[in-house]
Amino acid sequence: MRHPVAQVAKRTLLTIFGIPMLVAIAMSLVDSYRRRGKKPKPFPTRTAHEISVGGGTVTTYTFGQDLYDDMLAAIEGAQKQVLLETYIWKGDAVGQRFKKALIDAADRGVEVRVIYDSFANIVVRPPFKRFPANVKVLAFPVYSAGWRFFDLGRYGRDHRKILVVDDTVGFVGGYNIGTPYATEWRDTHCRITGPGVWDLSRAFADFWNLHRSKPRLLRRARRDEPPMLLSTASSWEPRIRVHRNIPRLWMFPIRGMYIEAINRAQRNVWMTHAYFIPDENFVDSLIDAASRGVDVRLLLPAKSNHIVADWISRGYFRRMLDAGLKIHRFRDAMVHAKTATIDGSWTTIGTANVDRLSMTGNYEINVEIIDACLAEEMERIFETDLTNALPLTLAEWEARDVYSRFTEMILKPLRPLL
């Protein structure tokens, strides 16, 4: 006979998490149905802009087609090595162009290595995921914990997007690979040349070596394959630092990078994020900055591709608006960027959202760049995005209807999970 206390506890947990989960699933299904066949509207962008940083350059991209053209040109010009890592890789026209470019590079003797996340591409047809033997592929498995199911550090997804060619040029940022992202999503990526590229190569190699020895049923890389080796970095680039979240090793430096930069801010903190579900300490840092007179602005999607994340992100809006933070909502298209610029000198561009999944869950990578010219360009990008955004006022927030308030309350228990 079950103990009454245990029964009450079980029912309470089911109520606290079960009802919000059912509501979240229903909302996602309804939203998916409503979005079928709808196309985003055009949005303003800036052309790719190259800036000298230290011993190399950094180029910013805010339009996917421009980025893809340069990435494909780099692969087509590769002479020694191509390293590609991505989260989503659609099997559509754009995805096929990348696959063909990689195979062509391998056929002419270039070392080609590819990493993609199997869960993110579970709906992609299997034939697209098959490569010839001269392309080395590591498909990060849907389930990677093996018998260590109790180890939470083994459940993170590979959310990174990296391309490195010949150790001379590297790309990193929020763009996945697929036709919709070329023209329909507003995202941010950057191209790096010079000494800073080596850290991107090392990030790829470290991930490859950490996961190459998985059991054969869980991966595509061969079990007896030797570890990937890198040449020693010839020099440091002090203005560019690469930060990597590695859940397997319980390393999560990106959150600390953000909080340290925000705590040092004196003039402005401008952040653009697709999914913004911060923890209490992160919100406190933003509010403390605003209390010092810092101009704190957040650019978020008015409606993202994950409606539940949109609703849960509203949990801190009242506190932030009361503190003087400015919240802007990008209209008529998905803004998927993960960027910030502070005080006209500090910038980060990468793959990590400000939510639990990115900050303490997934494999992520962000570059931190200290350069006034790049920060100036990032401010121009932010201001361009604001021309397509609506500000959220405190009066508008307080006037929201009963349905909105009720939905926010129902979904609140899911906030720690996302």
Image (cartoon, helix red, strand yellow):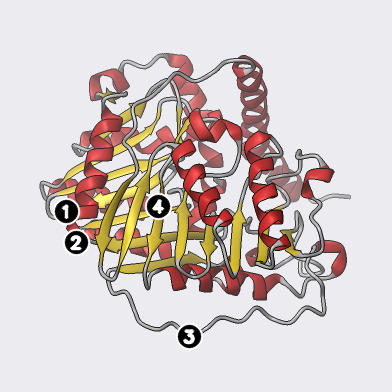
The residue singled out by tag 3 in the image is 232
Q: At 81% from the left edge and 72% from the top edge, which residue is drawn?
A: 222
| Three-letter amino acid code of the residue under disc 4 | Cys
The alpha-carbon separation of the residues under discs 3 and 4 comes to 24 Å
The alpha-carbon separation of the residues under discs 3 and 1 comes to 34 Å
Residue 190, disc: 4
Q: At 10% from the left edge and 46% from the top edge, which residue is drawn?
A: 293
The residue singled out by tag 2 in the image is 264
Element class at badge 1: loop
| Residue 395 visible in the snapshot | yes
Please say if the residues under marks 3 and 4 sit with CB atoms less than 8 Å apart: no
Image position of 8 with respect to 31: above or below:
below
Going from N to C along the chain, the mark reached first, 3 or 1, is: 3
Image position of 241 with respect to 355: above or below:
below
Going from N to C along the chain, the mark reached first, 3 or 4, is: 4
| Three-letter amino acid code of the residue under disc 2 | Arg
Q: Residue 92: percent from the left, percent from the top?
A: 69, 35
The alpha-carbon separation of the residues under discs 2 and 4 comes to 24 Å
The alpha-carbon separation of the residues under discs 3 and 2 comes to 33 Å
Please say if the residues under marks 2 and 4 sit with CB atoms less than 8 Å apart: no
Going from N to C along the chain, the mark reached first, 3 or 2, is: 3
Q: Residue 119: percent from the left, percent from the top?
A: 72, 48
